Image (cartoon, rainbow, N blue to C red):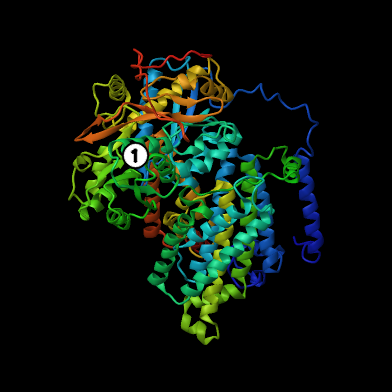
Amino acid sequence: MTQQTDRPATGARDPGPIPARRRFAALRRRLPHSTFGRHALAVLLALVAVVLVLELTSPFRNSQFATMSYYAIAAAGLTVLTGLNGQISLGHGALMAVGAYTTGLLLGPEADAGSGLPLPLVMLVAAAVTALVGAVVGAAAARLHGPYLAGATLALAVAVPGLAIYFDHWLGGEQGLRIASPEVPAWFADAVYFLSANETPTAKYLAYVGWGTLLVVLLLLANLMAGRVGRVWRAVRDDEVAAELAGIRLGQVRVLAFVVSAACAGLAGAVLGVVVRLAAPSGFTIVLSLGLLTAVVVGGLGSLTGALLGSALLVFLPPAVTNFGTAAGLDGTQAAQLAPFVYGVVLVLVMLLAPSGAVGVAKKLARRRTG
Amino acid sequence: MTIGFGRNRRAAFAAAAVAAALVLSACGAGGRPDEGSGSDPGAAADPGITATSVKVGAHFPLTGVAAPGYSEIPTGAQAYFQFVNAAGGVNGRQIEYVFRDDAYNPTQTSQVVNELVLQDQVFALLAGLGTPTHSAVLDYLNSEGVPDLFVSSGSLLWDQPQKNPMTYGWQPDYEIEGKIVGQYVAQNFPNARVGLFLQDDDFGRDGELGARRFLQNQIVAAERYTPGNTDVAPQIAALQAAGADVVIGFNVPSYTALSQLQSLRLNYRPQWIYSNVGSDPTLVGSLLARFSEGAVTGAGMLDGVITTEYLPGVDTPDNPWTQLFQRVWDEHGGEGELTNYRVYGMSQAYTFVQALQAAGPNPTRAGLVEAVERAGAQFEGPWVAPFRYSADRHAGISGMEVTRITGKTTESLTPVQVTDNGDAPITEATTQPAPPPAGGIPDVRPGS
């Protein structure tokens, strides 16, 4: 699902001097010819893996996977914008806030309050509203470059949580908007029970919702990246003048990239809202936006796999470091302070030793072995 | 090697899908067993409690902007629990205390509370800090049936026993603090023009509600600040322009420092009154030094400021409770001195030990909550006024005294004032807090 080549699967035609390569080619020939087919197959396999992992891990791991899913959705959207289209955004946390607040307003604080819309529809509305915001921001962003774009999106990240505090009658102010956690549908619990003989607590259901959404987003993004749109985005990123000479309208392309990315952020915000059960300004600070950006960079800019890896790091590293610190005999406060420190060290090391991120390193290794 | 797949791919896929479905359903359960064969819900013991241990969890800001001061609270609680454990624990159970960092971010609070409840399997949550942070986990804890005792915030949200039967407040709520301060000002500054400096959330709103009960005609301005925005110049200038000569602040410690610096800049010298939350002289002093880049040092600036107290402070070394807590900290504490925040944490830990004792030799989660409802109003400890716990109320300490900061200590301006929410009258406390028991560990009888 992360192949970005525009080539169809023609590798099979090469004779391939090495047996390993021939085996790979033979494997590749069996894959569906269409890009969509290949991506759909990968997503289906991933879905099976997700079901296995969620059924076999503890409720706490389930909740961590739910957390990871919303970071990954937003990071996938951001990696498309920054890695493929070359636009930096420090405001994705704010776009997630738009999604989360939309979800909160539609679902209401109690299960029986709110608009009574089903969850998938609420998530779509949240994505649409955020996409609209993204279009407005993108229209402004399309005229800006480099540090100016970073500055403008930074302003977004600072301003949006402020709006929630300003309109506190609507949006709950500093203490936030409570969001009713969706009930586990009976058919869903029955289906899971049918497969695994496990009950479905809310935490696991939310992890399913998050990962289901994530897989759909990855499928759509992978197709977008592999097709004409992705090619145009890359062309604009690599050489604006050449792209313009080739008849590409820079502004439109940039705004479209921003809209797609914002829609992902909105979906991520919707998942965050139902998982956290709260949309509060202190949850959408600049730290969130920067965290997403570092996840994308550490994982490997422009790669959906990289976005997944980066968000896994964001979720699993801090508790692991804290527990390691506690086990090593630090007291609770020191162990907690260790987590941001290690995260910073990892970031510095990645920037120094592997600026292309985890996926970049993996690709380089693979190339060295086969070439 | 490629038989069949090349040409008849669609059929092959269908076959593979059917096979996968068959395999999955074969290894699954296929359907639910009949009702009634399930296990008895009462048979399983609650998580987090064994014959020799009981596990308690908490979330605090240990890193980030809210960490100064607040991160000391769990170290105090930790020290007190170690003190109790060294004396044999509660009914033979050692108290295991786990506190995790949420950086004052509700998203992270939800993650760490998941970790505490699901991974660490705590028996109860104790003293989770903050209104926005803790409200993110309020529904979760109540729907999971995890006791959520003694939240470290004065919001009225924790006193909703019908909706949130597991949750209890602990400190005096901001509304009764507003009432007690309001009455003091009305009696002692009857001709003053009063300004309010409020944090723009429940904290400021509840405080204002209480203060207006007594000062409705005296208040000339109510200025609100948004937490996070460090420029309070417009608010302070507006208070000055309105001619307020008494300013009551319902704000957090960093805004005490900011408002002091700003009024210094404007040469504005009203009588400042800060709520208990925002008035720790040591913390405000260090914040003042930091914000002013060393131009203002020490807590001297708070000299003469009026505030409220409901626990003995470290500035009263003769108080028997302070002496007890000092002993606990010397024996079991980590680095640093005993601070008011650590006293706060120890007092909450002390209350928790009482609740655990009241729940009897074999506490359950439901039993613990029920024991606080039944016996909590009689708990005695370092706090100046009793809790308001009952079957209908989960509200915390019912009173406080008004004090003035002089140098590094405080002097009492009123006796302890006791009241309740709404238009309940304010009365003087009739009893003094009892001295601590000889061993320093409470002794609450179950069923009392």
Q: Is residue A335 above or below residue A169?
A: above
Quickly name the residue at label 1: B275
Residue A8 placement: quadrant: bottom right
Q: Is residue B314 above or below residue B51?
A: below
Q: Nearer the viewer, residue A67 or B386?
A: B386
Q: Is residue B391 above or below residue B209?
A: above
Residue at 37 percent across and 42 percent down: it is B215
Q: How many marks?
A: 1
The image position of residue A274, as x and y in percent, is: 59, 49
Q: Which secondary structure, mark 1? A: loop
Q: Say which quadrant the N terminus of chain A sits in.
A: bottom right
Q: Read off the chain for label 1.
A: B
Q: Residues within 10 Å of mark 1 (few under 14, many from 20)?
A: many
Q: Nearer the viewer, residue A154 or A347?
A: A154
Residue B328 placement: quadrant: top left
The image position of residue B264, as x and y in percent, is: 21, 51
Residue at 59 percent across and 31 percent down: it is B145
| Amino acid under disc 1 | Ser
